[in-house]
C-alpha cells in the first residue's frame, strides 16, 4: 500500500510539472482592458474634480470667496497656491491632501474647492491676502475655509495629514448640526446672540426618533441655530422655572428669540466685528444697524410643553415665526450654564415654587373686582381656588343662591330619610315586575 501511494504521488507531481501554461494572448487582452479602465477612471476623475483658480483681479469674486456676498451664498475651501510668474513655466503641483478632499467631498456640494494666490496685494488695504486675514503661509499646505460659513479661517495642520481628515473637518464646519453647549459663553455666542435659536435639553441619551427630529429641523430651517445641553450634568439657571420640571430620561425643548442688543457694547458678535473690519469701505448701512442693535442683550423664550417630536417642535417654531415672536415671553435675566449639584437643584426648586406662587398671585382677582367675579361664579370665584375645599365651598355657595331665588328650604334629616324609603319601595316594585319564576 505504501509503495502504491508513493507511485501515485510521484505521478501527480510529474503531471503538475508537465502541465502547459495558458496562452499569452488569453491573458493579454484582459490585462489591457483593466489598464484602460483604470486610465479612463483616473482621467474622468481629474476632469470632473478640476480645481478652479480664483481671478484675483475680480473684486466681486474675491468678496464672494471671503465673505459669501454672492447670490449663490456658497462656502469655500481655499488652497493658497501661487501661480508661476512666467506663464510658460509649469505651475507647482496641487497638494494631494487638498485634491483628495476635493475628490471625496465633491458629491455633497457643501463647498467649492478653489485655488487662490495668497501673496496677491489687495489694493484697498495694501496688504497681501495672507496678511489681511492672518494666513500663515509657513504652514504647508495653507488651506482656509470662508464664504457663507464666515470670514477666512485657516485649517490647523493636525487636520491636514490626509484628505479624509480634511473632509471630516469640513463636514463638521459646513454641514448643519446642533451646537454643543457646555458653558455660559457658548450659550451666549452660539445661541442667545442669534436671531432665533432652539435648544434641546437632553434628559439622557437621545433616542433615534429625537435625532431624526433634530436632523429634519436642521434641513427645514437652515438659517436657524439649534443647540443641545446635557441636562443630566448641567442646569440652565434663570430658566428652569419657566420650563417643565426636569426628570431623568425626559427631554425638553425651548425656543429663544433675540429681542434687542448684543454681546458687546456695539451689539455685535465676533463674526460681525471681523466682517465690519473687512468691509470698511462700505459700512454705512452697518453703522445704522449697529446703532439699532446697540445695548444689553435681551431675549425671549417659548418652551415646548409637549413631548419631543418633529411635528410639535415644527409647530412651535412656525407659530413663533408667524407672529414674529409676539407670543413669546421676555425674560429679565439671561440664562447661565452651571454644573448640576444637589444644592443647586434644591435652590432651583425653591425658585420654581416662588415663581409659581407669584404667577398664582398675579392671576388672582383684585379686591374691587370681587363682587362682579362672585356673581360670575365658577373658576372666577375667590372661594374656588381649584382645590377640593374650594370646589366644595363653590357648591355650597351656589346652593345658597338657588334657595334664595326659589324660596326653597333645606330638607330635614327626617324628610331625607322618608324620601330614601320611598325610593327603595319604588325600586322593589320595579324589580318585582322583571322577576320571572319557573312554571
Image (cartoon, rainbow, N blue to C red):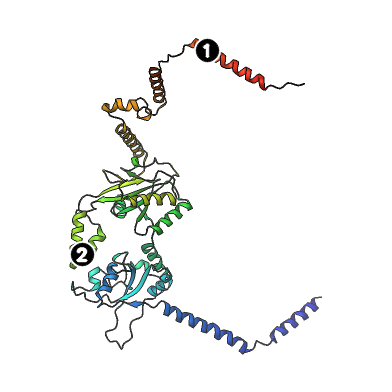
Q: Give the secondary structure at mark 1.
A: helix
Q: Earlier in the sequence, mark 2 or mark 1?
A: 2
Residue appearing at x 28%, y 51% in the figure: 258
Whether residues under marks 2 and 1 lie with C-beta atoms below 8 angstroms apart, the answer is no
Q: Quarter holding the C terminus?
A: top right
When asked about the image quadrant of residue 364, the answer is top left
Closer to the observer: label 2 or label 1?
Answer: 1
Q: Nearer the viewer, residue 152 or 397?
A: 397
* Residue located beneath label 2 in the image: 277
Q: Give the secondary structure at mark 2.
A: helix
Q: Quarter holding the N terminus?
A: bottom right
Between marks 2 and 1, how big is the CA–CA gap?
Answer: 92 Å
* Residue located beneath label 1 in the image: 417
Q: Is residue 176 above or below residue 43?
A: above
- Residue 148 visible in the displayed image: yes
Farthest front residue in view: 406
How many C-alpha atoms fall within 10 Å of the one at disc 2: few (<14), some, or many (≥20)?
few
When asked about the image quadrant of residue 347, the answer is top left
When asked about the image quadrant of residue 381, the answer is top left
How many C-alpha atoms fall within 10 Å of the one at disc 1: few (<14), some, or many (≥20)?
few
Percent from the top left, x then y, of residue 163? 41, 71
Amino acid at each position: 500500500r505504501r509503495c502504491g501511494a508513493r507511485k501515485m504521488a510521484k505521478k501527480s507531481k510529474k503531471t503538475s510539472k508537465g502541465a502547459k501554461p495558458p496562452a499569452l494572448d488569453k491573458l493579454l487582452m484582459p490585462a489591457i482592458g483593466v489598464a484602460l479602465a483604470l486610465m479612463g477612471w483616473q482621467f474622468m476623475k481629474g476632469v470632473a474634480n478640476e480645481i478652479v483658480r480664483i481671478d484675483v483681479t475680480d473684486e466681486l469674486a474675491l468678496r464672494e470667496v471671503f465673505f459669501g456676498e454672492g447670490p449663490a451664498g456658497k462656502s469655500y475651501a481655499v488652497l493658497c497656491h501661487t501661480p508661476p510668474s512666467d506663464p510658460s513655466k509649469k505651475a507647482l503641483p496641487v497638494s494631494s491632501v487638498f485634491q483628495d478632499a476635493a475628490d471625496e467631498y465633491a458629491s455633497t456640494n457643501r463647498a467649492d474647492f478653489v485655488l487662490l494666490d495668497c501673496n496677491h496685494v489687495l489694493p484697498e488695504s495694501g496688504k497681501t491676502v495672507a496678511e489681511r486675514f492672518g494666513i500663515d503661509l509657513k504652514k504647508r499646505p495653507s488651506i482656509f475655509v470662508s464664504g457663507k460659513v464666515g470670514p477666512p479661517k485657516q485649517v490647523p495642520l493636525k487636520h491636514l495629514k490626509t484628505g479624509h481628515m480634511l473632509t471630516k473637518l469640513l463636514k463638521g464646519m459646513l454641514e448643519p448640526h446642533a451646537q454643543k453647549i457646555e458653558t455660559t459663553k457658548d450659550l451666549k455666542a452660539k445661541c442667545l446672540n442669534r436671531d432665533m435659536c432652539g435648544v434641546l435639553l437632553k434628559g439622557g441619551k437621545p433616542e433615534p426618533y429625537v435625532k431624526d427630529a433634530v436632523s429634519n429641523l436642521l434641513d427645514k430651517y437652515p438659517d436657524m441655530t439649534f443647540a443641545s445641553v446635557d441636562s443630566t450634568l448641567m442646569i440652565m439657571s434663570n430658566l428652569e422655572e419657566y420650563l417643565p420640571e426636569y426628570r431623568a430620561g425626559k427631554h425638553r425643548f425651548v425656543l429663544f428669540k433675540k429681542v434687542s442688543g448684543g454681546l458687546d457694547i456695539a451689539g455685535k458678535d465676533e463674526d460681525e466685528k471681523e466682517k465690519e473690519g473687512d468691509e470698511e469701505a462700505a459700512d454705512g448701512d452697518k453703522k445704522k444697524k449697529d446703532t439699532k442693535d446697540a445695548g444689553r442683550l435681551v431675549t425671549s423664550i417659548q418652551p415646548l410643553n409637549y413631548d419631543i417630536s418633529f411635528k410639535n417642535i415644527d409647530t412651535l417654531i412656525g407659530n413663533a415665526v408667524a407672529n414674529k415672536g409676539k407670543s413669546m415671553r421676555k425674560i429679565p435675566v439671561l440664562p447661565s450654564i452651571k454644573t448640576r449639584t444637589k444644592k443647586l437643584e434644591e435652590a432651583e426648586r425653591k425658585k420654581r415654587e416662588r415663581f409659581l406662587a407669584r404667577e398664582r398671585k398675579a392671576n388672582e382677582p383684585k379686591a374691587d373686582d370681587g363682587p362682579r367675579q362672585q356673581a360670575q361664579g365658577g373658576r372666577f370665584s375667590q372661594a374656588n381656588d381649584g382645590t377640593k375645599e374650594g370646589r366644595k365651598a363653590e357648591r355650597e355657595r351656589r346652593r345658597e343662591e338657588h334657595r334664595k331665588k326659589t324660596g326653597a328650604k333645606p330638607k330635614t334629616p327626617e324628610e331625607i330619610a322618608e324620601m330614601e324609603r320611598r325610593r327603595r319601595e319604588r325600586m322593589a316594585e320595579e324589580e318585582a315586575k322583571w322577576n320571572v319564576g319557573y312554571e
